[in-house]
Amino acid sequence: MSDVSMIIDGERRAAPATFGVVNPATGAVHADAPDCSREQLDSAFDSAAKAFTDWRRDEAARRAALAAGAELLRAATDRIAPVLTAEQGKPLAAAVVEVRGAAHWLKYFSRLELPREVIQDDARARVEVVRRPMGVVAAITPWNFPVMLASWKIGPALLAGNTMVLKPSPYTPRSTLLMAEVLAEALPPGVLNAVSGSDELGRWMTAHPVPRKISFTGSVATGKHIAASAAPDLKRVTLELGGNDAAILLDDVDPAAITEKIFQGAFGNSGQVCSAIKRLYVPESRHDEIVDALAARAAAARLGDGLDPGTELGPVQNRPQFERVGGLVAEALRGGAKAVAGGGPLDGPGFFFQPTVLTGAAEGTRIVDEEQFGPALPVLTYRDVDEAVARANATMFGLSGSVWSADPDRAEAVADQLDCGTAWVNAHVALGPNQPFGGFKWSGIGVENGPWGLAGFTETQVRYRAR
Ligand code: NAD
């Protein structure tokens, strides 16, 4: 039996079977997690459906429970963060930030207003637009920020009056189950259920007749399957999918001022961030000095086990992803690109890949055209800014992007031309609970966070009162 449990109907539940969870710093199974059966999934959805009847009725009680949950989660940081590091690989300090960030997000939603808008009030009628909950939400999350991304769904879904069945990635199930166990102390039974299992469990969830909404964060490929699976039942979907973010440096940038920020934007969480910098466009005239500074920073990064206090970057989270990043880099090198930092995996156990900066890779190479989602960054040169913008936008991704300049107004005029959900100026991966986050094109449907994300967990209802 696993030492972590699923949460179904407010209770800790073991499953008939368990599956192994690998620590990416060693490459070996270090723990296990329950493998939810189909019957258990049915009972989780039944419980969520029953809980919905009362949960939807009392907004003040929901706010109080969410706020209490946020406090409990914050208080459990020291319990959850090491579990997150052991299964995800990120440095412990980053895991602490993630758990605290999730608590911050829940707190934000506990206070967010549910919009009500009077659109007409005259002799004929009083007409108001209100928001109604949808019912049961099926929430499915990826392995890069399991705790944080679950909070982006739990907060708004529950505040709006929905109940939930949540499934983390099979690569990182344990921190999410602990999170749900902690939050369940503040919530009525059935309001938040958490189950763990393989991708198959995700397929059962999206095909299940009970949920009215699927909130998914993960890859484009899975997002398309989910959209197809939701269609026959007309389930609502929010899809937060992959990105291939471009950062465009203008010709007046000061490398000393931006190198650290660019490095963090590309290599933070070992590059496993949906909105990381995945293509860096630099003016031809400034190429060498920018690349030298970035390569020196990448080469100095301290790679290691996330539990080691000196570690700055952890391993790639899982073997398939590790092999994919290695394959993309090797293919670029074979095609004539040059690694000015890193270039391959580290010898020894674990999925460690050197922070890699590539020059000389162009569009048409997979590491430029596809989402690498790992610690490898291609640097591309451009001659004029319009050309850089056109190349940045010439993709089916559209999650986010950034423009960097000593003159923020000049940068903003360029950012204005980017086709993506967030366009940063002199920043990248700057997120907040109040900012709607989502992607254009294949990077998603709908947004999370802020009142706009909350609206995605509601149906719009018109209240028409005749005079
Ligand atoms: P993934 O799509 O492989 O898996 C995500 C989740 O979906 C997992 O829980 C998995 O078990 C489940 N799943 C897999 N197949 C399924 C199916 N057919 N039906 C239902 N569920 C299924 O993604 P991943 O590899 O875990 O995560 C990395 C991807 O997530 C990257 O592309 C990254 O850019 C993206 N991402 C996007 C955001 C965002 O907010 N836009 C945030 C983080 C990560």
Image (cartoon, rainbow, N blue to C red):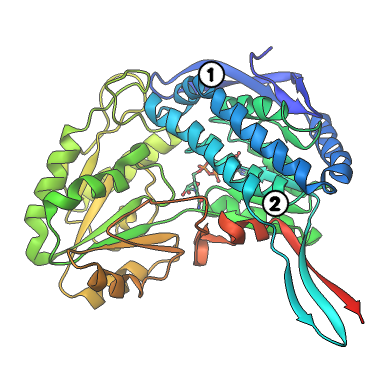
Taking the image as shown, residue 234 lies to the left or right of residue 415, namely right
Give the percent coordinates (x, y) of residue 15: 74, 21
Q: Secondary structure at mark 2?
A: strand
Using the image, tell me which numbered label, if any, was put on residue 214: 2
Taking the image as shown, residue 203 lies to the left or right of residue 148, namely right
Image quadrant in which you'd find residue 341:
top left
Number of dots carrying numbers:
2
Q: Is residue 214 above or below residue 20?
A: below
Q: Nearer the viewer, residue 29 or 13?
A: 13
Taking the image as shown, residue 155 lies to the left or right of residue 349, namely right
Q: Residue at x 30, y 71 (%)?
A: 412
Give the percent coordinates (x, y) of residue 159: 70, 48
Give the percent coordinates (x, y) of residue 1: 69, 12
Q: Residue furthest right?
A: 467
- The answer to whether the beta carbon of the residue marked 2 is less than 8 Å from any atom of ligand 1 is no
Question: What amino acid is found at the position of numbered circle 2 in the picture?
Answer: Ile
Q: Earlier in the sequence, mark 2 or mark 1?
A: 1
Disc 1: which residue = 79
User: From this viewpoint, is residue 91 visible?
Assistant: no
Q: Residue at x 63, y 57 (%)?
A: 238
Q: Nearer the viewer, residue 175 or 279?
A: 175
User: From this viewpoint, is residue 449 visible?
Assistant: yes
Give the percent coordinates (x, y) of residue 71: 60, 30
Spatial CA span between label 2 and label 1:
29 Å
Within the displayed image, which quadrant is ligand 1 positioned in? top right
